[in-house]
Image (cartoon, rainbow, N blue to C red):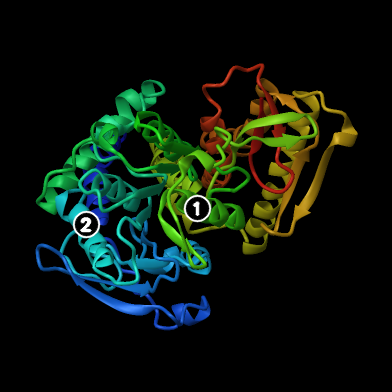
């Protein structure tokens, strides 16, 4: 009965409470107030404060840098951020002569609003900012562009479909408006678990924000008349969403998928990112170059590869599989209740009378710390063993070193492996250091061995993220292990 009750509570949490809690966090995000010294650190002393009034009366705050070339770009940050998060692309645009309006979305930063949704109010806030730019004397008629990231990209697209005052749109990993914008489910896990939870989550957002969701982005994209630049940075699902936006939009359009980042920082490839963003607006907006007015000329814009590929000593890399910190944290959050139920729940069923006594008599602290450190070293050693045995890599191609960036040991294989062998090498630590000790502890009635197995299973979360990312690839696919971070290249 205890196990059945725990399973029911777990199901209640995952299918009812978790989508509601996530929607509460979305509609009432914690505020990141722009610090007064943020502009000085970024060399943005020429920015001036801007206070706008939304159509429903909510105050919207931002910073504006006057235009030197007659064109201006509105920058919209991602959910949970503030205008400060867009200072890096703003700096590149300012150096190129563009006016830049950095705006705090409603219920973010210093802007007002009781709740944050995915509806008409948020889209209309973008239109309010565009109206402000169109009334400025330093901005030419037709010289307004918008760049948004994440949820800011969603509002940029929907605002551009409402007005011809926006003449160019750039988006990075735009969020979906509804489930109709999501890519097709990739398997039973998406079809029966992830997507139903996402549907509940979006429904809760509409109810908590007291406003219906915007229409599916896929339905408004064919109406766009502006040049569109779609960037697919971020997680695999964000990249898939970017590809869907690009595919549904009419010409002229561009798609760029940055490579080489680890997903934990933005923007990826900062210099290339900024240069391509500026080049897009240079070709899409009228602006002055010296004393001459340059009109939009899309025909002269160089086309970008779709997507960019990285050259390795063993051929082109089709794409990068690198677990981000957010992905690892997310999976660990989901795994922890299951691990508690699997290990501690099972231990409690078989040894109900021993748990309390063993908790009161823990092993010496030095022994626990030593076993954890040894486990981390063995974790990477098992990866190396998998490269040698399952991948049949030469011994000279496998090394075990200390990664100064992560302050942890790291195993690396310098030659390509089949995906089948790579999966074995990646999975070994979770099985031999996590599951087996956990099962052994339950069988012997040793609580601390059981806890050690649970902890080492959670320590393999990054490995599990990699396995999930490559689960749909054929076992004969070729992969090349990253030398400086977790993950691999999938070779084309």
Residue at the (64%, 44%) spot, across then down = 486
Q: Which of the numbered marks, if any, corresponds to residue 203? A: none
**According to the image, label 1 marks what residue?**
277
Decide: marks 2, 1 in contact (CB < 8 A)? no
Residue 238 visible here = yes
In terms of sequence position, does the residue under pointer 2 or pointer 1 come before the other? 2
Count of numbered tags: 2
At label 1, counting other C-alpha atoms closer than 10 Å, the crowd grade (few under 14, some 14-19, many 20 or more) is some
- Give how far across and how far down residue 53 sits, in percent: 16, 70
**According to the image, label 2 marks what residue?**
127
Between 394 and 69, the one nearer to me in the picture: 69
Residue 428 visible here = no
Residue at the (76%, 24%) spot, across then down = 391
- Give how far across and how far down residue 389 sits, in percent: 79, 25
Between 295 and 279, the one nearer to me in the picture: 295
- Give how far across and how far down residue 207 sits, in percent: 12, 47
The image quarter containing residue 173 is top left
171 vs 4: above or below = below
Q: CA distance from mark 2 to mark 1?
A: 21 Å
* Numbered disc 2: secondary structure: helix
Q: Quadrant of the N terminus?
A: top left
- Give how far across and how far down residue 39 sits, in percent: 45, 78
Between 114 and 163, the one nearer to me in the picture: 163
Residue at the (58%, 34%) spot, across then down = 305
């Amino acid at each position: 009965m205890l196990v059945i009750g725990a399973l029911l509570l777990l199901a209640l949490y995952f299918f009812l409470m978790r989508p509601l809690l996530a929607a509460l966090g979305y509609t009432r995000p914690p505020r990141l107030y722009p610090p007064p010294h943020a502009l000085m650190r970024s060399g943005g002393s020429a920015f001036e404060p801007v206070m706008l009034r939304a159509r429903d009366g909510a105050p919207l705050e931002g910073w504006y840098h006057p235009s030197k070339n007659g064109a201006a770009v509105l920058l919209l940050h991602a959910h949970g951020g503030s205008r400060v998060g867009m200072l890096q692309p703003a700096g590149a645009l300012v150096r190129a002569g563009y006016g830049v309006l950095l705006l705090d979305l409603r219920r973010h930063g210093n802007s007002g609003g009781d709740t944050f949704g995915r509806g008409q109010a948020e889209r209309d806030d973008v239109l309010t900012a565009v109206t402000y730019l169109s009334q400025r004397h330093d901005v030419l008629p037709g010289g307004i562009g918008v760049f948004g990231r994440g949820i800011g990209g969603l509002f940029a697209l929907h605002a551009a479909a409402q007005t011809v005052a926006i003449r160019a749109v750039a988006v990075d990993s735009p969020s979906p408006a509804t489930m109709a914008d999501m890519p097709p489910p990739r398997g039973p896990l998406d079809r029966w678990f992830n997507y139903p939870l996402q549907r509940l989550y979006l429904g809760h957002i509409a109810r908590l924000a007291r406003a219906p969701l915007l229409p599916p982005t896929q339905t408004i994209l064919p109406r766009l008349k502006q040049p569109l630049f779609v960037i697919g940075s971020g997680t695999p699902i964000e990249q898939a969403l970017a590809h869907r936006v690009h595919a549904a939009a009419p010409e002229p359009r561009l798609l760029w998928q940055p490579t080489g980042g680890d997903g934990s920082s933005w923007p990826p490839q900062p210099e290339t990112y900024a240069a391509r963003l500026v080049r897009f607006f240079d070709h899409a907006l009228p602006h002055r170059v010296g004393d001459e007015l340059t009109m939009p000329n899309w025909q002269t814009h160089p086309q970008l590869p779709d997507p960019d590929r990285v050259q390795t000593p063993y051929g082109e890399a089709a794409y990068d599989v690198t677990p981000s910190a957010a992905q690892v944290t997310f999976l660990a959050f989901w795994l922890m209740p299951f691990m508690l139920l699997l290990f501690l729940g099972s231990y409690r069923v078989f040894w109900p009378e021993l748990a309390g006594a063993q908790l009161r008599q823990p092993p010496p602290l030095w022994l626990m710390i030593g076993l954890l450190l040894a486990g981390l070293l063995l974790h990477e050693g098992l990866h190396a063993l998998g490269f040698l045995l399952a991948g049949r890599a030469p011994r000279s191609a496998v090394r075990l070193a200390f990664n100064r960036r992560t302050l942890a040991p790291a195993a690396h294989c310098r030659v390509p492996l089949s995906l089948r062998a790579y999966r074995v090498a990646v999975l070994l630590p979770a099985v031999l250091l996590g599951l087996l000790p956990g099962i052994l502890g339950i069988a012997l009635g040793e609580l601390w061995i059981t806890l050690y197995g649970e902890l080492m299973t959670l320590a393999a979360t990054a490995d599990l993220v990699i396995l999930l990312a490559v689960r749909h690839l054929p076992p004969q696919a070729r992969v090349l292990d990253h030398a400086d971070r977790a993950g691999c290249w999938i070779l084309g």
